[in-house]
Amino acid sequence: MAFNFILMLTENDLTIPDASARLEDALEAGARHIGFKDVGLPFEDLHGLAKSIRNAGGRSYLEVVSLDKESEIASARAAVDLDVDCLLGGTRAAEVTEITRDHPLRYFPFPGQITGHPSVLEGSVDDIVASARRLADLEYVHGLDLLAYRFSGDVPTLMRQVAQAVTKPIVVAGSIDSEDRIRTVAESGAQAFTVGTAAFSGAFKSGASFIDQIRSLLAITADAQALSSAPRRLALVAHNDRKSHLRAWVLRHRKALAGHSLICTGGTGALVKDTCPELNVRRLQRGSKGGDQQLGALVATGELDAVIFLADPTAPHGSDVDLQALTRLAIMHDIPMALSGSAADLIVAAFLPPD
């Protein structure tokens, strides 16, 4: 995720009764990251929501707000049965990961001490940061769901320190009801935020319809993208006859690429590292040995923000198969993909904020 807005079909930590109708409006407005809580509607209705989001090409989220162990475990099982893409929340990561570890969903538990309903985040900044580190160290935890604006202390400091303490993505949830708060979340280094109640109460565009509220939120998110300090995860690949093009492109953008994670197939990774040793390069297998398929797996699990593949249009058809498969996955999972230098420039302009 780069910097994403996740619409929650919820009010006051409950899934709304007319969630199905609101989902249709949200999709019409352009929302693609959409979630709901584990409480408020029967399981059958939640199953219908998850299926509709998936069929529309969106990414689905279930957030756990149940505080007792039995309910939280039941919610984790429900997330698996609903086949959602991401499970947000909960406080019992060790028990939940025993259920989710063999399922492709991504799990983002709450750091810190959570009490009450609607949920409140308690503890000191240091305690919450320590909790975040412990959770992020768990193998089957893929990120954190931080209730930053349910915290009574210094919220910007909390978000910034948690983001600096862990390398896994952070979703900021709860009580985000203004453009200023969205901008602050972006500046903190978080990768996404949720909005539920505020979208239904008209907090972002007074007197506007729900569809216009969502469009306003998407516009605010796009503007906040330029403020985001979260490291981006970019795949870099080039066919052999385009490696010189990629080298020139990397040299032009080396300043913008600094501090971000570049995931490359083997030969491309060696080229990038030799060209700009200061860049953060992770090398996968060479393309001929499965590197493109490894990138496809990262696309499928939401671990890439964009793919830059400088392709040779005159290459033999044997090279087309891997590129077609990777392109199909990028389309399916709504990941931007550039196949030429000019298109790659647009990704830099959109995702890598200027100094």
Image (cartoon, helix red, strand yellow):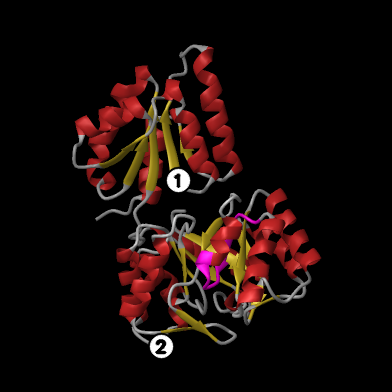
Quick check: is 207 in the magenta stretch? no
Q: Secondary structure at mark 2?
A: loop
Which residue corresponds to the image point at 38% horizontal and 30% vertical from the top-left?
A: 265
Q: Quadrant of residue 85?
A: bottom right
In what element is the residue under mark 1? loop
Quadrant into which the C terminus falls: bottom left
Rendered image quadrant of residue 84: bottom right
**Picture coordinates of residue 291, whole percent (x, y):** 43, 29
Give the amino acid type for the residue marked by disc 1 in the picture: Leu
Q: What residue does disc 1 label?
A: 304
Tag 2 or tag 1, which sits nearer the N-term? 2
Query: Foreground: 11 or 206?
Result: 11
Pointer 1: residues within 10 angstroms few (<14), some, or many (20+)? many
In this orientation, which residue lies closer to the viewer: 171 or 112? 112
Q: What residue is shown at x 52% (from left), y 14% (from top)?
A: 318
Numbered range of the magenta stretch: 84-94
Q: Position of residue 274 (x, y in %)?
A: 20, 30
The answer to whether residue 216 of the structure is visible from this angle is: no
Q: Which residue is mark 2?
A: 152
Q: Is residue 337 left or right of residue 283?
A: right
